[in-house]
Image (cartoon, rainbow, N blue to C red):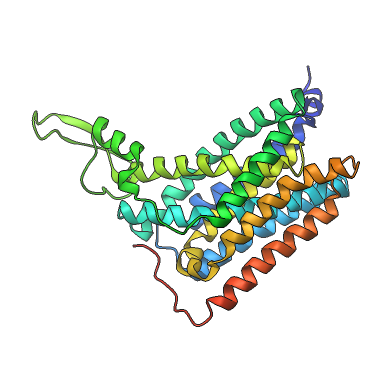
Amino acid sequence: MDLMSVLLSEWLGKPAWMWLAFMSVVVALLVLDLGVLHKDQHEIGVRESLLLSGMYIAVALLFGGWVWWELGSQSGIEYLTGFAIEKSLAMDNVFVIAMIFGYFAIPRALQHRVLFWGILGVIVLRAIMIGAGAALVSQYGWVLYIFAGFLIFTGIKMFFAGDGHADVGANPLVKWMRGHLRITDHLHGQKFFVRTPHPKTGRMTLWATPLFLALVMIEIADVIFAVDSVPAIFAITTDPYIVYTSNIFAILGLRALYFALAAIIHRFAYLKQALAVLLVFIGGKIFVADLLGWEKFPAEWSLAITALILAAGVIWSLWKTRGQSAKAPPF
């Protein structure tokens, strides 16, 4: 089999060259991010965070334009809708990431390293979850209704949930790691693992650092959030290519935006309620389409309603929290 045949062969409904094109863009962004822009592990300020995030969003939108041109307007609109939804749902990660960094006392100069390596784990974990979801949906169409019901339930629960903060130290995984792994009491620069003398034997022993624990907790947090976000994007489209690309581009940009959002996240006090309404809408539109005899809820309507809900949540939040001073991000 020659190279052209391999590139044109289909994988999850799309030619292999389209998947390679997407992964090439992601790899180029990651190399540029860590290898060029942040190879000195400096502290990232708000201005740099916004510029870097703007770059990621611009690339994501350009990719969406290419999807529109290559696959048609329906796929283009589904990509943009999925990107907007995933980006918004992922903003909840900022609260959790800030708590994790605060608990492990990770200084801002090292936070980007954790987030960068975290995104590599996200790329793999989301691929596994989306691949499993695509297989289920293709074999059992009724799974979409389970996703829809789950989104409605989650949205209602989120709308009435309080804003209490979880105790990272009480997390069972943190307790397990502290009980089963050798962990240093202090950070050792940007190292996840170090070799130091064992206090009892004096032999050089491999130890994990708090930086590694923070990385593990951020990866686990992303898996938990993916339980909401992956069904949400499948309710928009069942095309694995659109699902995965919109997911990854949303997560890539959010990691860059974290350093700016962490300082002003209190200004988005009512965004959670808007996201809750959005989840109910995403789940509900599947049942509405069936009741009205539609093959599918119109993609243009989904994009417009999604934008309206999110804009209302942001504007209302900014209005209600006007005059509040910015909070310094953790460490």
Location of the N terminus (image quadrant): top right
Q: Is residue 290 above or below residue 328?
A: above
Residue found at the very far right of the displayed protein? 293
Comparing 37 with 324, the one in front is: 324
Q: Is residue 244 above or below residue 267?
A: above
Location of the C terminus (image quadrant): bottom left
Judged left or right of residue 172, residue 162 is right
Q: Which residue is depicted at the point 47% across and 79% down? A: 324
Whole-percent x and y of residue 52?
56, 61
Comparing 21 with 148, the one in front is: 148
- Quarter of the view holding residue 172: top left
- Quarter of the view holding residue 292: top right
Whole-percent x and y of residue 3?
77, 24
Q: Which residue is depicted at the point 40% across and 40% down? A: 216
Whole-percent x and y of residue 320?
56, 76
Judged left or right of residue 116, residue 27 is right
Q: Is residue 111 above or below residue 248?
A: below
Whole-percent x and y of residue 13?
79, 30
Judged left or right of residue 177, residue 316 is right
Q: Which residue is depicted at the point 23% across and 34% down? A: 182
